[in-house]
Image (cartoon, rainbow, N blue to C red):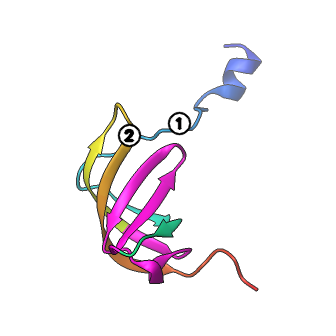
Amino acid sequence: MSFIRKYLKGWKFRDTTPSLTVGDELDVFVAESNSRNEGHVYVGDTHLIVEGAGPETVEKRVRVRVTEFDDATATGRGEFVEVVGESSYTG
């Protein structure tokens, strides 16, 4: 095996549109929310609308359970589980 193959063994590139499965739980930051108590989460180019993630969750790290997901469009829906961290911006 060449030096380069040994060096690169096990490396893989991250996908900008990760595939999610119904029931998956992930910790993510809520980017924005609307008045209907839904938040918007982006994981790379993947977009989830999260029910129950109101304005108070914006810029907080939350746990989300995926309730539906379309691989073709990299979009889906999830439900808010809990806040697991504060904003990544500290002043």
Callout 1–callout 2 Cβ contact below 8 Å: yes
Magenta span? 36-63
- Give the Cα separation between the discs numbered 1 and 2: 9 Å
The spot of residue 46 in percent (x, y) is 46, 45
Label disc, if present, on residue 65 of the rendered structure:
none
- The image shows residue 20, relative to residue 58, as above or below, that is above
Question: Is residue 30 visible in this depiction of the protein?
Answer: no
Answer with the quarter of the image where residue 36 lies.
Answer: bottom left
Label disc, if present, on residue 15 of the rendered structure:
1
- Is 20 positioned to the left or the right of 46 in the image? left
Secondary structure of the residue carrying tag 2 is loop
Say which residue appears at 48% left-offset and 38% top-offset.
17
The spot of residue 14 in percent (x, y) is 56, 38
Which of these two is toward me, 49 or 34?
34
Secondary structure of the residue carrying tag 1 is loop
Label disc, if present, on residue 19 of the rendered structure:
2
- Is 31 a magenta residue? no
